[in-house]
């Protein structure tokens, strides 16, 4: 059973390092059960925001609630996939066993099914760190999905993968979303955002500049920053 994550409510979130305000009073409520895509130029604070929502970074101020409960009570029901997955020096299957020891004991066949779902059935007994980049990313996704997370966070999870791996990961993410997992995806890939996103949250200089339907965002971005970003202009 997936635990309900919505609404995700971020209030007054700020993070400063030295002189720089990296996240600047972020107020954001995510209500959409579909896929929310966080977009914005390099250095906008997308990864930092995602890490805060996953509880990996403590902000200087502000709060995060999921389904009206503080983040600290909720971390077990969410999972994150990073651009560069960190895998154990073990086989692909052992990486899943380590992530889900109870499931591995009760229903070991389920782990093989999880590998097959990401087209890694034939790689089960290969060292995870010897897999290709795309295979490692698919393994990381399989590992994240073992928990049946109520919230799945993906940070540039398909950057530098070939089209077939991108397609497979996007299909699995969409499927999970339809099964009830809320998805928040950071991506620069406009094609991917158009394929996946129900809403876009556009960040610039550590602030939320726009939050609207993907259709509205791409057809008529409301801010100069988003217009420049979509036009491929470098923003300082
Ligand atoms: N630990 C840190 N100390 C100081 N500055 C940091 C730290 N982590 C991130 N930053 C800075 O915060 C800003 C936002 O970083 P973040 O990784 O969130 O950007 P991003 O929007 O994900 O960018 P990109 O699209 O390039 O991945 C960047 O300028 C980065 O250099």
Image (tube, rainbow, N blue to C red):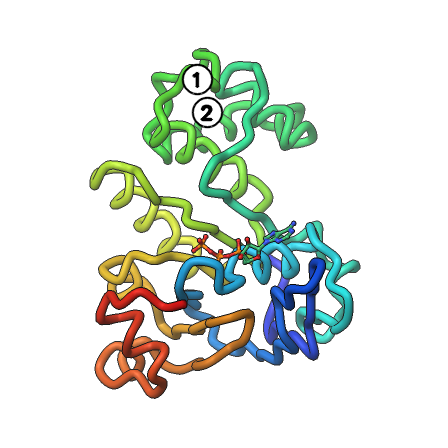
Mark 1 = which residue?
124
Q: Earlier in the sequence, mark 1 or mark 2?
A: 2
Q: Is residue 122 above or below residue 208?
A: above
Inspect this view and state whether residue 179 appears.
no
Q: Determine the residue positioned at 23% across, 36% down.
A: 162
Inspect this view and state whether residue 92 appears.
yes
Give the foreground label among 1 and 2. Answer: 1
- Looking at the image, residue 174 sits to the left or right of residue 150; the answer is left
Q: Nearer the viewer, residue 108 or 185?
A: 185
Q: Nearer the viewer, residue 3 or 153?
A: 153
Label 1 CA crowd tier, 10 Å (few <14, some 14–19, many 20+): some
User: The C terminus lies in which quarter of the figure?
Assistant: bottom left
Mark 2 = which residue?
112
- Looking at the image, residue 201 sits to the left or right of residue 71; the answer is left
x and y percent of residue 227 in the render? 28, 78
Q: Is residue 119 above or below residue 198?
A: above
User: The N terminus lies in which quarter of the figure?
Assistant: bottom right
x and y percent of residue 70 in the render? 77, 68
Classify the position of ligand 1 by quadrant: top left, top right, bottom left or bottom right.
Answer: bottom right
x and y percent of residue 173 in the render? 39, 52
Q: Nearer the viewer, residue 104 or 129?
A: 129
Where, by quadrant of the figure, is residue 161 drawn? Answer: top left
- Marks 1 and 2 sit apart, C-alpha to C-alpha, by 7 Å
Q: Determine the residue positioned at 47% across, 13% down.
A: 127
Label 2 CA crowd tier, 10 Å (few <14, some 14–19, many 20+): some
Q: Is residue 16 above or below residue 1?
A: below
Helix, strand or loop under label 1? loop
Where, by quadrant of the figure, is residue 119 drawn? Answer: top left
Helix, strand or loop under label 2? helix
Q: Determine the residue positioned at 43% across, 73% down.
A: 202
- The answer to whether the residue labelled 1 contacts the one labelled 2, judged by CB atoms less than 8 Å apart, is yes
């Amino acid at each position: 059973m997936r635990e309900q994550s919505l609404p995700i409510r971020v209030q007054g979130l700020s993070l400063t390092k030295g002189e720089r305000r990296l996240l600047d009073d972020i107020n954001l409520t995510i209500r959409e059960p579909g896929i929310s895509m966080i977009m914005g130029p390099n250095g906008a604070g997308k990864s930092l925001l995602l890490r805060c929502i996953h509880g990996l970074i403590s902000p200087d101020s502000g709060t995060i609630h999921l389904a009206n409960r503080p983040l600290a009570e909720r971390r077990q029901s969410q999972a994150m996939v990073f651009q560069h997955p960190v895998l154990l020096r073990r086989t692909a299957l052992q990486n899943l066993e380590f992530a889900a020891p109870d499931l591995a004991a009760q229903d070991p066949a389920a782990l093989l099914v999880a590998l097959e779902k990401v087209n890694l059935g034939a790689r089960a007994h290969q060292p995870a760190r010897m897999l290709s980049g795309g295979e490692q990313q698919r393994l990381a996704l399989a590992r994240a999905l073992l928990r049946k997370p109520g919230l799945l966070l993906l940070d540039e999870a398909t950057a530098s993968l070939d089209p077939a791996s991108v397609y497979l990961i996007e299909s699995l993410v969409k499927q999970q979303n339809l099964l009830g997992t809320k998805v928040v995806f950071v991506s620069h890939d406009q094609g991917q955002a158009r394929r996946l996103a129900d809403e876009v949250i556009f960040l610039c200089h550590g602030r939320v500049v726009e939050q609207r339907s993907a259709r509205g965002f791409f057809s008529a971005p409301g801010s100069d920053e988003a217009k420049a970003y979509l036009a491929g202009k470098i923003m300082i």
